Image (cartoon, rainbow, N blue to C red):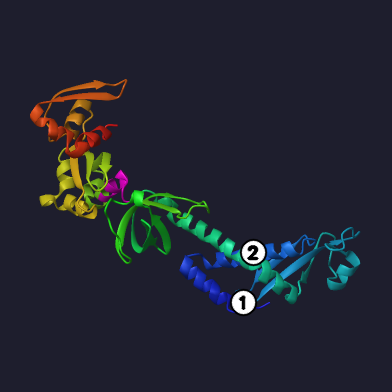
């Protein structure tokens, strides 16, 4: 049976969906085989084949050679089989092509739906394999459209949804905008509207931006120990150096603030505090609450509570605007 333009259709789908062409051929053969089995339930062994040179699609049924025939639909007597093949032995299979007219009705009624279903499955598998090893990476995408607070972003022929909760507050996107996100997870569930879980609001997004902008972090000389964030407003990261000659805060800030300003621009003006990490918890807390100067720190390890005492003129600095500074400082050490 010849399906008009089936090879062209396979080529188009392979390009548009990023699915391997050979996998698409398998998908079509599997779908047509399944459709034929639904129609010819009394046939035990059915196989569809697509000729990738001619585009000819054929479906075959098989009968097993037997000395004693118990199932005429699926078995053939050895005497009859040897008229077709003189070397036929019990257990061998004889191939019969299913009539094209009957096959056409099968494809029209059932196979089309199965083909689309299996193409979606193949597309999902392809996306999963393509991105599963990139979890935690920054992705560069292009905004395709926005709908009811959801922003649809395309990466390498794959569309993902950036939900409102994962956006930086007050960001607005237009079709064609280039955008950077962090890939948080890759799903393989057909019920999920977006396989790629992406974010611009997660604290890890800030961490990855610093890794991309600061060579010392990428090389492992400077390490980001913790990150806390209120998206669109303020973020804190704590850093330490594995080289005594390298100042971790200075490396992150860059010459005249060039590195950190680049990240602030990406975050639409979100303020960033970069603090020295310390193994000594009181020192770490003091660094986290800067620029406020602390008089006393009392740590309750069991309750995971810290009491901090400051002079009255330092109170507003310690708390920060709408409590931002103290909230973020409490998140850094956990």
Q: Earlier in the sequence, mark 2 or mark 1?
A: 2
Can you give x and y, in whole percent of width and height, for residue 330 in the image?
A: 25, 32
Q: Quadrant of residue 30?
A: bottom right
| Vertical arrangement, residue 194 with respect to residue 241, above or below | below
Q: Are marks 2 and 1 in contact (CB under 8 Å)?
A: no
> Would you say 56 lies left or right of 80 here?
left
- The dominant secondary structure in magenta is helix
Question: Magenta includes 207?
Answer: yes
Point out the frontmost of discs 2 and 1.
Answer: 2
Q: Quadrant of the N terminus?
A: bottom right
- Relative image position of residue 56 (x, y in whole percent): 65, 76
Where is residue 275? Give x, y as percent: 18, 38
- Residue 186 lies left or right of residue 285; in this view the side is right
Residue at position x 90%, y 60% in the image: 69
| Disc 2 from disc 1: Cα separation | 16 Å
Region in magenta? 200-209
Above or below, 313 relative to 4: above
Residue at 10% across, 51% down: 256
Q: What residue is shown with label 2?
A: 31
Residue 301 placement, left or right of 80? left
Q: Residue at x 50, y 73 (%)?
A: 12
Residue identified by numbered label 1 = 55
């Amino acid at each position: 049976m010849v399906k008009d333009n089936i090879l062209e259709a396979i080529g188009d789908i392979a390009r548009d969906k990023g699915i391997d062409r050979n996998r698409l051929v398998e998908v079509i053969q599997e779908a047509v085989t399944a459709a034929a089995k639904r129609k010819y339930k009394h046939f035990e062994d059915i196989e569809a084949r697509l000729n990738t040179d001619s585009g000819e699609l054929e479906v075959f049924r098989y009968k097993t050679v037997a000395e004693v025939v118990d199932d005429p639909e699926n078995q053939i007597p050895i005497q009859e089989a040897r008229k077709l093949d003189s070397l036929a032995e019990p257990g061998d299979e004889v191939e019969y092509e299913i009539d094209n007219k009957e096959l056409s009705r099968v494809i029209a009624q059932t196979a089309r739906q199965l083909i689309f279903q299996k193409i979606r499955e193949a597309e999902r598998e392809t996306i999963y394999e393509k991105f599963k090893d990139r979890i935690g990476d920054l992705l560069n995408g292009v905004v395709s459209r926005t709908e009811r607070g959801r922003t649809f972003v395309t990466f390498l022929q794959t569309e993902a949804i950036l939900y409102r909760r994962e956006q930086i507050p007050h960001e607005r996107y237009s079709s064609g905008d280039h955008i950077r996100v962090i890939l948080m997870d890759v799903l393989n569930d057909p019920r999920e509207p977006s396989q790629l879980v992406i974010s611009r609001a997660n604290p890890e997004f800030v961490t990855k931006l610093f890794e991309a902008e600061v060579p010392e972090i990428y090389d492992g000389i400077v390490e980001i120990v913790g990150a806390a964030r209120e998206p669109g407003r303020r973020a804190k990261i704590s850093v330490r150096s594995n080289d005594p000659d390298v100042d971790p805060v200075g490396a992150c800030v860059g010459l005249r603030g060039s590195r950190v300003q680049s990240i602030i621009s990406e975050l639409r003006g979100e303020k960033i505090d970069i603090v020295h990490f310390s193994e000594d918890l009181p020192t770490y807390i003091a660094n986290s609450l800067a620029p406020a100067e602390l008089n006393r720190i009392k740590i309750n390890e069991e309750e995971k509570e810290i009491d901090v005492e400051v002079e009255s003129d330092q109170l507003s600095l310690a708390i920060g605007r709408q409590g931002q500074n103290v909230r973020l400082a409490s998140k850094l050490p956990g």
